Image (cartoon, helix red, strand yellow):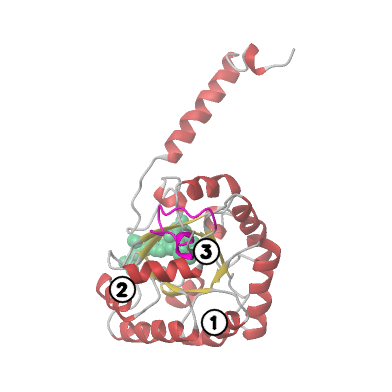
Amino acid sequence: MSVSTSRPTTLYGGQTGRRVTVRDIAAAKERGEKWPMLTAYDALTARVFDDAGIPVLLVGDSAGMVVFGHESTIPVTVDDLIPLTAAVVRGTTRAMVVADLPFGAYQAGVAEALHTGARFLKEAGAHAVKLEGGRRVLPQVEALVAAGIPVMAHLGLTPQSVNAFGGYRVQGRGEDGERLMADAKDLEAAGAFSVVLECVPAELAERVTAALSIPTIGIGAGAGTDAQVLVWQDMAGLTPHTAKFVKKYADVAGVLSGAVQEFAADVVSGAFPGPEHGYR
Ligand SMILES: Nc1nc(=O)c2c([nH]1)NC[C@@H]1CN(c3ccc(C(=O)N[C@@H](CCC(=O)O)C(=O)O)cc3)CN21
Ligand SMILES: CC(C)C(=O)C(=O)O
């Protein structure tokens, strides 16, 4: 058996019997192959996504909103995300699991970023981390990469800056686009293995994708990025109100609501439990 047989033919759908690595992701960019990414926050749903062949799962700080019920990602802590990340790792065998570094857990400097990044790898078994920002976090990106922690960058609408932006708004229009392009190039030079582009004009995302040798992962950034990510509860129809960039692929809220109402009616009527659900 040659060494090359251990490399997947495609990132999505390619079978190797091992975890996806940063080298597999780099190879997909070289092949010009597009790939899907989803968020995950627990073992059972992560397992469904892993079995479906999703190569990269993000334990996003969007957990603050979709898991913990906050109004933004600002209140999320490292201690909130570590057990969720550990659950996603335990629920999967093939996906690379990327952990979001929460607000206030890396901005203070290199030492803080290294401390937080190491916790996600040691305590949760994450394979990489994601952090938000451009030039202001380059030292953190360089230090994490030097320490052996792969870094996914995140530009455009960086939700941890929602208070500075004055709401969740499209970023990178006009002159801001050139600054975003420069930040993307600097993040690649600092060693990031990929970059999320959130809520930026499609034309800008396409230009950044062409300018970088690392993959771009779009969310509300048009069809020209190398990968696409969505929050799973949004694409599956569990989130009540979603942004314009979301496509709803299922009605999980409707299915679950129907099941819950049937269960409740069966309890009230005495139809559940039946003899087959009991012990003699
Ligand atoms: N469930 C969920 N899905 C997400 O995609 C997500 C989160 N939560 N939490 C963290 C951030 C916040 N995100 C958001 C939230 C709202 C908009 C939004 O409402 N955008 C406006 C665009 C406004 C404009 O035109 O500038 C929209 O109408 O789509 C976008 C991204 C993306 N992330
Ligand atoms: C929406 C994705 C990119 C994210 O950052 C998150 O889930 O927190």
Q: Nearer the viewer, residue 251 or 36?
A: 36
Name the amino acid, label 2.
Ala
Q: Is ligand 1 less than 8 Å from the beta carbon at label 3?
A: yes
The image quadrant of residue 76 is bottom right
Residue 134 is at least partly visible in this image: yes
Q: Which residue is mark 2?
A: 205
Which contiguous range is marked in magenta? 3-18
Q: Is residue 42 above or below residue 34?
A: above
Residue 255 magenta: no
Q: Is the CB of mark 1 within 8 Å of ligand 2? A: no
Amino acid on which disc 3 is placed: Ser
Q: Position of residue 227 (x, y in %)?
A: 37, 64
Circle 2 packing at 10 Å, graded few (<14), some (14-19), many (20+), is many
Task: Determine whether, in the image, residue 190 is placed left or right of residue 78.
Answer: left
> Most prominent secondary structure in the magenta stretch?
loop
Q: Earlier in the sequence, mark 3 or mark 1?
A: 3
Vertical position of residue 164 compared to residue 2: above or below: below
Q: Provide residue 244's location: percent of width, then percent of height.
A: 32, 58
Q: Which residue is under mark 1?
A: 141
Q: Which mark is residue 72?
A: 3
x and y, in percent, of residue 251 in the image: 40, 40
Quadrant location of residue 68?
Answer: bottom right
Q: Is residue 232 above or below residue 145?
A: above
**How far apart, in angstroms, are the residues tagged by discs 3 and 1?**
24 Å
Whole-number angstrom distance, CA of label 3 to CA of label 2: 25 Å
User: Could you say which is closer to the camera, residue 266 or residue 25?
Assistant: 25
Q: Going 28% across and 68% down the picture, which residue do you hit?
A: 224
Residue depicted at 38% across the width and 66% down the height = 28
Question: In this rendering, would 172 be left or right of 153?
Answer: left
Q: Nearer the viewer, residue 161 or 142?
A: 142
Q: Name the residue type under label 1.
A: Val
Which is nearer the N-term, disc 1 or disc 2?
Answer: 1
